[in-house]
Image (spheres, coloured by chain):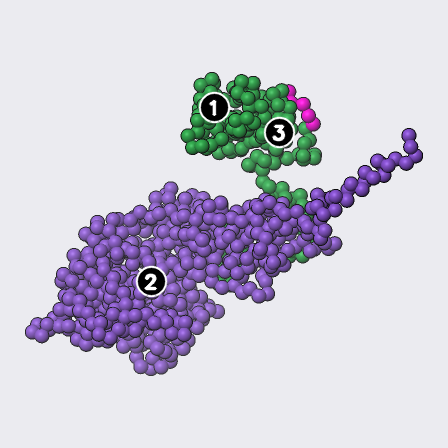
Amino acid sequence: MTDLVKENILLNAVTSAFKIEGKVIRDRRVEVHADKNTVSSILLFAKKQLGYIHMNHMTCIDWIEQGEFELVYTIYHPVDKLTLFVKTRIDREIPVMENIDTIWDHANTYEREMREMFGIEFPGLVGEHDFILEDWDQIPPMRKEFDTHKYAAETFYTRPGREDAKDVREELSKRSGTVVPDFAKKYSRE
Amino acid sequence: MSFIDLKGMLQPLGAVKQLFKKPHTIQYPYETNKASDNYRGLHFNDLDQCIGCGNCSTICQNDAIDMISLDNIDGKKGDSGLRPRIDNGRCCWCALCVDVCPTGSLNLTKDYIFVTDNPNDFLLTPGLDNPDAKDRLSYTCDMNTSLSLYDRVPMRELDGKERVKSFAEVVLGYSEEEARAEADRCISCGLCTEACPENMHIPEYINAIARGNDDDALRIIYDNNPLPEMCGKVCTRVCEDVCALQVRGEAVAIRWLKRYATETAPTVEMIKEIVDPKIEEPNGFSVGIVGAGPAGLTAAYYLALKGYDVTIYEAQAHAGGMIMYGIPKYRFPLESIDKQIQYMESIGVKIKYNTKVGKDITFDEIYTNNDAVFVGIGLQNPWNIGIKNEDSPGVISAIEYLKIINSDETYDVGKKVAVIGGGNVAIDGARVSARFGADVTILYRRRVEDMPADWEEIEGAEHEGINIVPQAIPTRIIKDEKTGKVIGIEYLKAKMVAEDGGRPRPVAIEGSETIYECDTVIGAIGQQADFDWLPENYKEDLIIERGKIQVNDLRQTGVTKIFAGGDSVKYGNSDAISAIADGFNAVKGIDKLLLK
């Protein structure tokens, strides 16, 4: 179990075929990092040549500091019981990624979700633009710059009966009889 | 085809064989499905474990959490007394509140069914409304999964062997990067502010450091502490004892962050430029201050800012009181004190050095010539150890010894030293002796864990090769019959006896007399105030009980015009930050008295 033979064979097969980097995460888990243009080729190769016939999942991570979105394709070999993660990064400013619902039909659902939640475009993707959100007129809500707190405060009213809420910092200064000077207040907890 | 379909009539009877089998459909009595192990259902809060820091309420993106007072929970130091209440109409069970709970008191349970006709019932106070949910916890967070940062950025220090060679400062201070990382750990709850005797604006200045605005941090610090460099180095930091993070991990290094902020302004001019103190027009009142210790200096600083004419009378050649003469220079270098004093003088505080009240100037004179007087004399006289031969040459109190060394004079402790006591002063005396090459042993009545000294000081002493003998009760000092000089100390070993579940008390074991040969015995078992300078008529009116001056909240004594603070009054602990608080509060008192 611990010698990871199957995992290393898979890693070598993919990395040597496409000249990319990757690593064995642990037993039954292998990941590779690819350029966005080669992702569909890798997926097709894995499906047709290596037997990774099932796509488990497809997801996105917002790396706002680096100005990138990371897309992760999780595919599975039901006989070898191995999972391969294909990861790629795309520019956050030009969030366009190749549509792969021709390889797996159900990728369509994931791609529609990502289009709605992260604003990533998949040229040629067929499907309604409204997926879960209705009449959404803000920036895509899973992007990190989306202010969930502000949105919730503006959209949902506050139930009556919550007026007795207290601010911890204020309560403590009141009890100890101190006054936080105005110029310092911008550093207090909101 | 027959009219009677026998097969069709009998076949249903076959179902009888299922009668005693476990049904696949709904069971009776009715059982609900079990939720998965980390299911995120309704909240549960352990009300005793919760400290009311409000981090859950701050993180909630849906504004679903309020902090409210509960009838049976009172606030105390380290507990705001508030507890979270969840609006389950807004909650989306993301469980961020659980992930950021520093104490781990807030959890989610497996409860996912809650039916009610009244929408107001969705306001639930977890723990109060569902005490039985404690047994159904599912989504919890331990120290590995928590989003709180429990590990302190370590402070760089000189190596123990290197330290004993000189009086160079032991603690090296945070770099900018380290300070930002450490400040980032703070959750800004403010529980520390209540524990701090001076109620400093701790979350605010730490947040300013975290955001990279060191100037603002310094300005906030100077708002109610004019001696931050001293506090940043040697404060007893009771604030860190109540930090929300120390419940499970390490407290935010509040003291070191304050030190970092003060280090960003290395000169008097820079402090003045950054703090930019607003000095009001002279208001015509004058205040005389006895003693330039932390209490007197603090009162002087804020009085001067308010336009009072302030003069401090100091018996010694340097200002600072115990922080100048009682703290070894490897903890608090002379330049640091000088910088703070020069800054005070630059905003108009006058200090008369080498002026002992009662000798060089009478108290009557100060009393008559000023509109108010502040007394901050500290505790100057050491308690006697109370054993035989204590008056022999070679026996000295730690306070006197530290004063001699800090005044750049010399005192030969010889090759072997015994220090008696377990407080910070004892450790200071021991570590200073070690720097003169002596082999030092500390004798303490109780166990090491009972020592009132800071653990960092105890650890520092151990790293410097100082031997600590706990549970040792000194019985007599042995002197050479010819020269009269100390040659050793005799002590009894003690066992710890807990009576009535109280604090264990050391009881001497008979016949366990042990002799430790030494050249010097340093006593450090406490100090008392010296009131000899005070004329008799004032002594009565001031009300001095058990060696301490009695004062009210505004640090006003029995004499309307006289205020007092610091170690010689009854308020707070005997530490510098309490003295600063006394000085600060006395300013409010003097203001109230004179300006109304």
Label 1: how many Cα within 10 Å (few below 14, some 14–19, many 20+) = some
Q: Which chain is purple?
A: B
Nearest the viewer among B21 and B558 is B21
Q: Which mark is residue B468?
A: none
Whether labels 1 and 3 share one chain: yes
Which subunit holds the residue at mark 3?
A
Amino acid type, callout 3: Tyr
Comparing labels 1 and 2, the label whose residue is closer to the camera: 1
- Graded by Cα atoms within 10 Å as few (under 14), some (14 to 19) or many (20 or more), the crowding at tag 3 reads some
Which residue was labeled with disc 3? A110
Tell me where the magenta segment starts and ends, as one range: A123-128
- In percent of width and height, residue B160 lies at 24, 51
- Residue B187 left/right relative to B177: right
Q: Residue at x 61, y 49 (%)?
A: B110
In depth, the one of B555 and A139 nearer the eye is A139
Could you say where residue A143 lies in the image, as x and y percent from the top left? 57, 34
Instruction: Compute the Cα span from label 3 to label 2.
Output: 60 Å
